[in-house]
Image (cartoon, helix red, strand yellow):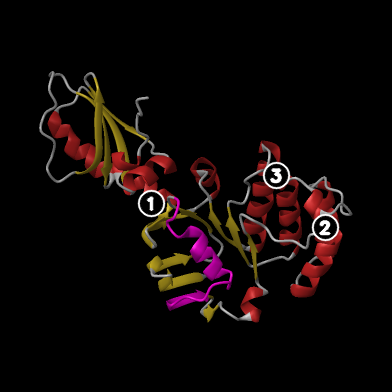
Amino acid sequence: MIEVKNVVKSFDGFRALDGLTMTVPHGAVYGLVGPNGAGKSTIIRHLAGIYRQDSGDVLVDGQPVYENTAVKRRMAVIGDDWYYFPQSGIREMAKFYAGLYPAFSWERYHKLKEVFPLDEKLMLRRMSKGMQKQAAFWLTVCCMPEYLILDEPVDGLDPVMRRQVWSLLLGDVAERGTTVLVSSHNLRELEDVCDHVGILNHGKVLLERSLSDLQDNTVKLQVAYQGVTEPPLPAELNILHRSHVGRVYTYIIRGSSREIMRRMQITEPVLLESIPLTLEEIFIYELGGVDYAAKDILL
């Protein structure tokens, strides 16, 4: 289990992390989402042991990460900008990884040649970004990590390879109990693979739940009324967003779907329909609704 407790980190007076607290359960695929500048890459560098927090705790199975070789050997990280030795090829990097990770599997390395169609001897610096990303996954999963931390993991990969990589990672989660933390702006893709989500903003986790709980506790309704005007809505409803086109109103409401539907019956709608919310919609409205929605710009 990964635990981050009240972590504070400042750079030249700017507080990048402001008491951040989050928990990644064992064997979970945890999606960390947030706007640019929210602190996602900063907390990932803490989890990787690159940064040392000003205060608070960054723990893996109860052990601090920073300068803890034993913990780092159980963990692998693929950053948005993957580092490699410029003069090396995949085979040379594999030897380097094998020296760092006792669990490195050469058997798996050879099997994955069929998955990643790359030239082992070609220098990595001569590869495209997408090819380098494939090489990073090839080498990293051969380390057999218990914890895998990913920052924009499939950026630069084509759709077929994206699917192949996710299949490989989710197979490790199912078969080996690998714990995966992934930060990405591709919320549609995260929705397909994550079972837990943390929404980060201004250096704090605003909301942290399983994806199913998150979707069950935020409801999107489409409602039509017989009259021309909208009737008074129950005051106890926590409405995050309201809009309408003609006589059809759309509401985003936080709370239990069953309870909200029951309370909305008092408005005597001629149409009352609940629509599943996407992770992208939850993200937008949890961060402030229309303030984060796309704005029309007149030129």
Amino acid on which disc 3 is placed: Gln
- For mark 3, does the 10 Å Cα neighbourhood hold few (<14), some (14 to 19), or many (20 or more) residues? few
* Residue 203 lies in quadrant: bottom left
Where does the image place residue 111, in percent across and percent down from the top left? 83, 54
* Residue 280 lies in quadrant: top left
Amino acid on which disc 1 is placed: Asp
Q: Residue at x 39, y 46 (%)?
A: 283
Residue holding disc 2: 90
- Is residue 155 shown left or right of residue 62? right
Q: Is mark 3 on a helix, strand or loop?
A: helix
Which of the numbered marks, if any, corresponds to residue 164? 3
Which of the numbered marks, if any, corresponds to residue 159? none
Magenta residue span: 36-59
47 in the magenta segment: yes
Up/down of 60 relative to 212, above or below = below
Where does the image place residue 171, in percent across and percent down from the top left? 67, 53
- Is residue 273 shown left or right of residue 78? left
